[in-house]
Amino acid sequence: MYKKRTLATEHINNHGVIYFFVLVLFLIGIIFGAIIVNSMNWIQKQDLFFYLEQFFTQMLEGPIVEKQEMLKSSFFYHLKYLLLLFVLGLSVIGMPVIWILLFIKGLVVGFSVGFFVNQMGWQGLLFAAASIAPQNLIIIPVYLIAGSVAMIFSLTLIRKIFTRRLQQPIFQPFLRYSLLFISLILIISVASMIESFVSNEAMEIVIRSIYQ
């Protein structure tokens, strides 16, 4: 246990800059998402809010999607996202795409929360807390870790190419890389369950409290 803790501490110390860069990139995405909301004109906001109100109405009438189907859809969405990051980490030229994916993830979160608050005030904040926050408390750290580790592995490959050390064994780093992503996929499955069974119920409660 102590050895694992030491290895984790050493890993963070060696690659802290990458983790910090990924976090800043994600936060910039959130800020840009909020800026986009504020830059939308009144007609665009009303058109988008019209579709949101239709969704609220459908939720009040009954479940739009079965929870099991929602769980399956959520899990496979996050699985594809993580597998894409995994593959990009294996390629030498995949880093810019990793940056774009993490930035877009932050952009979506910032836009969603910003739009709810902009249109609905404190009720929008409550809705965002119920529908977005629970699963994203797990999903966001997982994506940030996945993106950081993919960057680290990609940089390792680049370093081996430019220093002509390709003859050095890559199997052990690849095995650790793969096992970490498998662990992240297992964690994401928990987030999908929270999204399907907890967030969905909380969202319905908030919608009913707003419209009743």
Image (cartoon, helix red, strand yellow):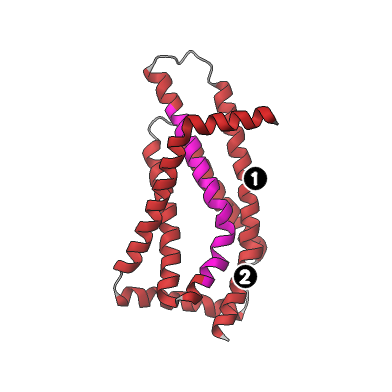
Q: Amino acid at mark 2?
A: Ala
Residue 21 in which image quadrant: top left
Q: From this viewpoint, is residue 80 visible? A: no
Residue at position x 50%, y 31% from top?
13
Q: Nearer the viewer, residue 76 or 19?
A: 19
In the rendering, at what x and y percent does residue 211 appear? 55, 84
* Among numbered discs 2 and 1, the one appearing first in the sequence: 1
Residue 98 lies, with reference to residue 205, above or below; the image says above
State the CA–CA distance, disc 2 to disc 1: 24 Å
Say which of marks 2 and 1 sits in front.
2
Residue 6 lies, with reference to residue 102, above or below; the image says above
Say which element carries label 2.
Answer: helix
Q: Which residue is mark 1?
A: 186
Answer with left or right where residue 153 lies relative to residue 172: left
In the rendering, at what x and y percent does residue 149 appear? 50, 36
Q: Nearer the viewer, residue 129 or 168?
A: 129
Q: Which residue is mark 2?
A: 202
Q: Amino acid at mark 1?
A: Leu
Residue 46's disc is: none
Magenta stretch? 126-155
Say which element carries label 1.
Answer: helix
